[in-house]
Image: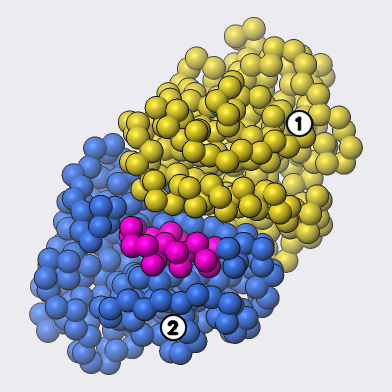
Chain colours: A blue, B yellow
Amino acid sequence: MVFQIIKEAFSSKHKNVTTKSSEIDFVTETDQAVEKFLIDGLKEKYPNHRFIGEEGVASGLKCQLTDEPTWIIDPIDGTMNFVHSFPNVCISIALLVNKVVEIGIIYNPVLDLQYTARKGEGAFLNGNPISVSPTTALSDSLVIMELGTTRDEEKRQLVRDNFNILQTKCHGLRALGSCALNMAHVASGGADLYFEFGIHAWDIAAGDLIVREAGGVVYDTEGGPLDILGRRVICASSIEIIKEVIPLLKQMKNERD
Amino acid sequence: MAEHLNEIYISVLELVNSGGKIIKEAFSSKHKNVTTKSSEIDFVTETDQAVEKFLIDGLKEKYPNHRFIGEEGVASGLKCQLTDEPTWIIDPIDGTMNFVHSFPNVCISIALLVNKVVEIGIIYNPVLDLQYTARKGEGAFLNGNPISVSPTTALSDSLVIMELGTTRDEEKRQLVRDNFNILQTKCHGLRALGSCALNMAHVASGGADLYFEFGIHAWDIAAGDLIVREAGGVVYDTEGGPLDILGRRVICASSIEIIKEVIPLLKQMKNERD
């Protein structure tokens, strides 16, 4: 039902939009409505569960990950796309227990693409099993990298640098505007590598499980284990690609979630 | 001619839908038969060739006097010649790199030109089931529902699509870097999806506000040209003159205001005409 909320609001050419951390970091009424809907629904059934939701954190709630069952929610990942009615938007939701992702769901209701995973049970697209590509070399890779929604000059220079570095080393670059859906594309084999700096826990929690259950790998951008609150991610079809690309990338750190 | 066009439109839609099935079935295979054309990353597959042959054979059978400009035919040596005769301009798979990777942004792009004017344009992504269509003077549609461009008129409010391309040519790569640097801070965001025709479709359906590319071909833009304009958008040569279908470059947007604002900012290049 919540998907209907997004799908119906999606086509409107006049959405109620405000900004958060920069003049292009948008939030809409729909982001807020969907997050409330999901959290209210889950709280009703599971009053002891904890929640980390993008809009809750934006409005001042603390972002705290304990061992307690915790839902990490992005009600609309790809808000810029949503504002523009560009059809690459999704709900991203994950349940962590003891800080381990047990359930991951990424759902694009406009294109009807639902990526799901349960720990240890594989990854699926609309119920059909998916797996990462067989690619092991950067030079054979289709790479996703994003511009981001910040006017911060350090971040923009980082993006330019990494773009220049990768431009000639892979099959091609893609930029779709949704972190969660980018991870879903790696999981389903459509892309071989994706990384981004400055994203948040709610952008990557579901994708973390889905990529790994699809046979892929997810790391911190410097090669250590993924820190869900670490504000950056790199994922790929194979560890070989990760080992090849990490030494090439320029890095940055953001304040943890 | 109008009635005749109606019948032609129905025929070509049927062929496009069947061609789409061929693509969809081959799409999921993780091991495709791939060769290269103009560079080490300019791919062509058996499916490109099969779909082009299927479409052309089907159309030739019904319309033996029609002419054809197809991507794979031209690649194999056929001359690319646009006359006033009814001419089909066909890209059997636009987004071949995506197709090779099973990245779901692929489409058939097909247009019919009469007296060098686009009468019919169809862009069909059979993997995501998105079919963009237009008949001259009759509006643009996505899966039968009317579409129109966004109301955006300023570059600073725009979602912009720009591509890297499949060439190792250094001049082109520098051009891409330059335009990327120029636009990075001037718009809402940049997207790159890997299919020229689908990029134009996104402008037509209002999802993006501006798209331009250098080095593309007639078969990438012919259908999109009609669909964007029938959706209320504008299509030009990248220097602001009228679009040259064989000119190897295109710029399209929701509005003329965006075009006028961005053209003076862009670095340009020319390729040999189709």
Give the magenta range.
Answer: A146-163
Mark 2 vs 1: CB contact within 8 A = no
Which kind of residue does numbered mark 2 sit on?
Asp
The image quadrant of residue A99 is bottom left
Q: Could you say whether the residue bearing mark 1 is in a helix, strand or loop?
A: loop
User: Which chain's residue wears label 1?
Assistant: B
Query: Of residues A140 and B100, which is closer to you in this image?
Result: A140
Q: Residues within 10 Å of mark 1 (few under 14, many from 20)?
A: some
For the question of whether residue A165 can be seen, the reply is yes
Do dots 2 and 1 share one subunit?
no
Checking the image for residue B79, the label placed there is none
Where residue B234 appears, as percent x and y from the top left, is: 48, 25
Q: Could you say whether the residue bearing mark 2 is in a helix, strand or loop?
A: loop
Identify the residue at horizontal 80%, vertical 41% (top origin): B72
State which quarter of the image contains the N terminus of chain B. Answer: top right
For the question of whether residue B62 can be seen, the reply is no
Checking the image for residue A220, the label placed there is 2
The image quadrant of residue B90 is top right
Query: Of residues A126 and A223, which is closer to you in this image?
Result: A223
Which kind of residue does numbered mark 1 sit on?
Arg
The relative height of residue A220 versus residue A132 in the rendered view (above or below) is below
Q: Which secondary structure type mostly characterizes the magenta part of the structure? A: helix
Checking the image for residue B273, the label placed there is 1
